[in-house]
């Protein structure tokens, strides 16, 4: 469901779905990655970075989480448009 909402760019609803998944399954790195991107799209960079870091702690090889974390760090440094 989260992926479908993601594709429809229904970011707030997708964030709710991914958050609910993580309440029951906190060791699900892909859900942390998806939530991270969704929060990024919602403009919540602090929480997005937290979720990307959590995903990387659980799965250091997660290329998508690395990419999102990189975007967020660049935004913080002011070298990327919001």
Image (cartoon, helix red, strand yellow):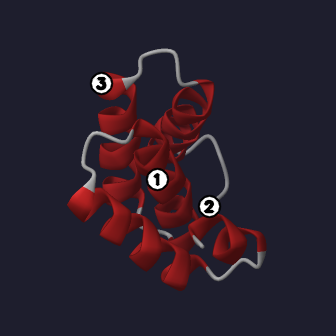
Percent x, y for residue 14? 54, 75
Which of disc 1 and disc 2 is earlier in sequence?
1
Towards the viewer: 52 or 20: 20
Q: Position of residue 69 (x, y in %)?
A: 48, 36
User: Residue at image x 40%, y 48%?
Assistant: 32
> Which is closer to the viewer, label 2 or label 1?
1
- Point out the tag, 3 or 2, that comes first from the N-terminus: 3
The residue to which callout 1 is attached is 36
Q: CA distance from mark 3 to mark 2?
A: 26 Å
Label for residue 54?
Answer: none
13 horizontally vs 57: left or right: right
- Quadrant for residue 1, please give it: bottom right
In the drawing, what numbered circle is on residue 82?
Answer: 2
Q: Dot 3, how many residues are within 10 Å of its Cα: few (below 14), some (14-19), or many (20+)? A: few
Of residues 8 and 53, the one nearer the viewer is 8
Q: Secondary structure at mark 1?
A: helix
The vertical placement of 68 against 12, above or below, is: above
Q: Give the spatial CA distance, label 1 vs label 3.
A: 13 Å
Q: Position of residue 75 (x, y in %)?
A: 53, 47
Mark 3 touches mark 2? (CB < 8 Å) = no
Quickly name the residue at label 3: 57
What secondary structure is marked by label 3?
helix
**Residue name at image x 53 percent, y 24 percent:** 62
Query: Between 50 and 80, which is closer to the camera in this rendering?
Result: 50
């Amino acid at each position: 469901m989260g992926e479908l909402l993601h594709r429809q760019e229904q970011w707030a609803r997708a964030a709710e779905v991914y958050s609910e998944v993580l309440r029951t399954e906190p060791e699900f790195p892909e859900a942390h990655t998806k939530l991270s991107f969704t929060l990024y799209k919602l403009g919540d960079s602090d929480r997005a970075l937290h979720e990307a870091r959590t995903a990387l702690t659980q799965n250091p090889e997660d290329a998508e989480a690395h990419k999102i974390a990189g975007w967020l760090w660049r935004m913080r440094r002011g070298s990327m448009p919001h």
